[in-house]
Amino acid sequence: MPSHTPLRIAFAFDRQSDWLAKGFKPNQCQEFQTDEAIELMAAGLRELGTVEMVAGIRDLTKRLVAGEHANWDVVFNMCEGYGSLGREGQVPALLEAWGVPFTFSDSATMAVCQDKSKTKVQSCP
């Protein structure tokens, strides 16, 4: 088995139970991850190194301002965001602004792909 340098991973997520505790209804939280799913993903990430749990965009923002991102090699982004049309691009945009590497799509890709009318626009020949 090849050896590797353990990664320092920030695991950013939106947990259903956190949003339910804020007073949201279950149907408003369907896209968010369950406690079990979060723990299973974190366990997999721990096989790659150390994992810091980051509960949503507000927790992430506080940690960025505090300078904690200097300790991270990458952010594993599972945040869904909430409210706006471009909600799933919120965390990628924040991480891009701070120059922090992260997994999955960038903010522009997320904004376009989540707007179904934009995904159907055809380019001119």
Image (cartoon, rainbow, N blue to C red):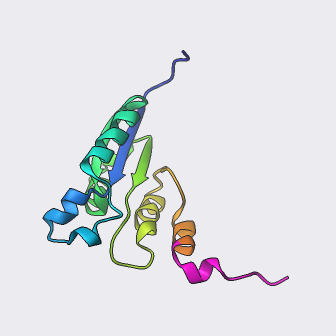
* Residue 122 included in the magenta stretch of the image: yes
Q: Is residue 20 left or right of residue 82?
A: left
Say if residue 42 shows up in the picture.
yes
Q: Quadrant of the C terminus?
A: bottom right
The extreme top residue here reads: 1
Q: Is residue 90 above or below residue 75?
A: below
- Residue 60 position by quadrant: bottom left
The residue drawn where x is 62% and y is 77% is 119
Q: Is residue 101 left or right of residue 56?
A: right
The residue drawn where x is 54% and y is 59% is 105
Say if residue 71 shows up in the picture.
no
The extreme front residue here reads: 27
Give coordinates of residue 116: x percent, y percent.
56, 79
- Residue 86 position by quadrant: bottom left
Quick one: 10 or 68, which is closer to the camera?
10
Give coordinates of residue 51: x percent, y percent.
33, 37
- The magenta-colored residue range is 114-125
Q: Quadrant of the N terminus?
A: top right
- Residue 49 position by quadrant: top left
* Residue 42 included in the magenta stretch of the image: no
Give coordinates of residue 32: x percent, y percent.
32, 60
The residue drawn where x is 39% and y is 34% is 44
Quick one: 99 or 16, which is closer to the camera?
16
The residue drawn where x is 14% and y is 63% is 21
Q: Is residue 42 left or right of residue 23?
A: right
Q: Is residue 56 above or below residue 121?
A: above
Instruction: Report the label total.
Output: 0
Give coordinates of residue 72: x percent, y percent.
39, 42
